[in-house]
Amino acid sequence: MTTLRQLEDRLRAWQSFRGIAGATRTLAAAQSMHWVEVARRAQAHLARCLALRDAYPGSRPSTDAPRLLVGLGSDLGLCGPFNRAVAERLSVEQSRGFLACAVVGERLRAHMGAGALVLPAATSFEQAQNLATQLELLLSQASIDQTRLVLVLAAGIDPDGRPQVTAWNEPESTIAMPRPLLELVEPELTATAVASLTRHARLLAALARSAASETEARWRTMNRAHEAADRRIAEQEREIRKQRQELVTQEMLEARQGARATRAVTGGLAATPDRQYR
C-alpha cells in the first residue's frame, strides 16, 4: 500500500515537472511567434527573388535535372514526431533518386542514419542566414542551372500536433519583373547571380518555416505535458486527502476505543472492595 509520504513525494515531483513544462511552453510560444514573423518576411523576400528570376529564363533549371535534397530537422527535442515525420518523407524522396543529400539537425540524422552531410540547426535569424549561405556554398559544387533543389520540411503543425511534412520543389513562375533596357553585364552572368540569390532565398524561407513549425510542435507537446501534469497533480491531491481522512478516522477510532478501555478499567476498580482498610 502506498504511504502518505510516498504520495506527497510524487505530488512534489509532478509539481516540479509542471513548472518545467510551463516554462518550456511559454518559451516555445514566444519563439514560435518570432519565427512565424521571420518566415513571413523570408517568404516575401523569396517572392521578389522569384519574380526577378523569371526575368532571366536561363536561371531556371530544367524539369529533368538531377535533384539536390535537403532535409530540415532539429537539434533539440520535446517536439513530438517532428524529426521522425521529416525523415520518413526524406526517405521517400531519396528513393526517387538524387545527386546529393544534406541534413539539418542532429536529431533528424539520428532517424536517417549515416550517409548524409549533417549541419547544425539554426536557433536565430542570423544563424539561419549563415546556414543558408553555407548550404548554398556546399550545393554550388553542382551547377545551379543543371540541378534542382528539393527541400523536405515540416511546413506546419496540425491541431493534434502532427507535422505537415512536404517537399518544396522548384517554385512555379510568378509575376515576372521586366528586364532592364540596358544591362551593364552579360545576361548570362546576371542569370547566374539571380539563380544563386533565389536559391539562397529558398533556403532561408525553408529554414524559417521549419523553425516556426518546430517551435509550434514543441509548444503543443509541452502544452499537453502541462495538462497531463495538472491531471496527475489533481489525482495525487485527491489520494492524499483520502489517506489523510482515513488516518484521522483511524486515530479517532483508536482514541475512542482507548477511552472505552480506560472507563472500563476505572469502573472495575471502583466496583472492587478495598479490603486494605477493613
Image: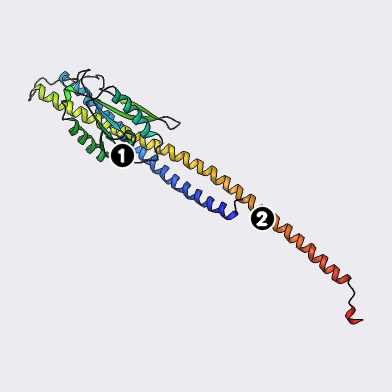
Q: Residue furthest bottom?
A: 277
Which quarter of the rendering shows the C terminus?
A: bottom right
Q: Earlier in the sequence, mark 1 or mark 2?
A: 1
**96 or 259: nearer the eye?**
96
Q: Residue at x 19, y 33 (%)?
A: 138
Q: Residue at x 21, y 34 (%)?
A: 135
Where does residue 222 sit, x and y in percent of width and height? 44, 40
**37 or 239: nearer the eye?**
239
Task: Decide if residue 15 is on the left or right side of residue 1.
Answer: left
Where does residue 88 sit, x and y in percent of width and height? 35, 28
Q: CA distance from mark 1 to mark 2?
A: 53 Å
Where does residue 14 sit, x and y in percent of width and height? 50, 48
Residue matched to label 2: 247
On residue 259, which mark appears?
Answer: none
Where does residue 179 sit, x and y in percent of width and height? 14, 20
Q: Residues within 10 Å of mark 2 (few under 14, many from 20)?
A: few
Callout 2 secondary element: helix
On residue 106, which mark appears?
Answer: 1
Q: Residues within 10 Å of mark 1 (few under 14, many from 20)?
A: some
Amino acid on which disc 2 is placed: Leu
Q: Nearer the viewer, mark 1 or mark 2?
A: 1
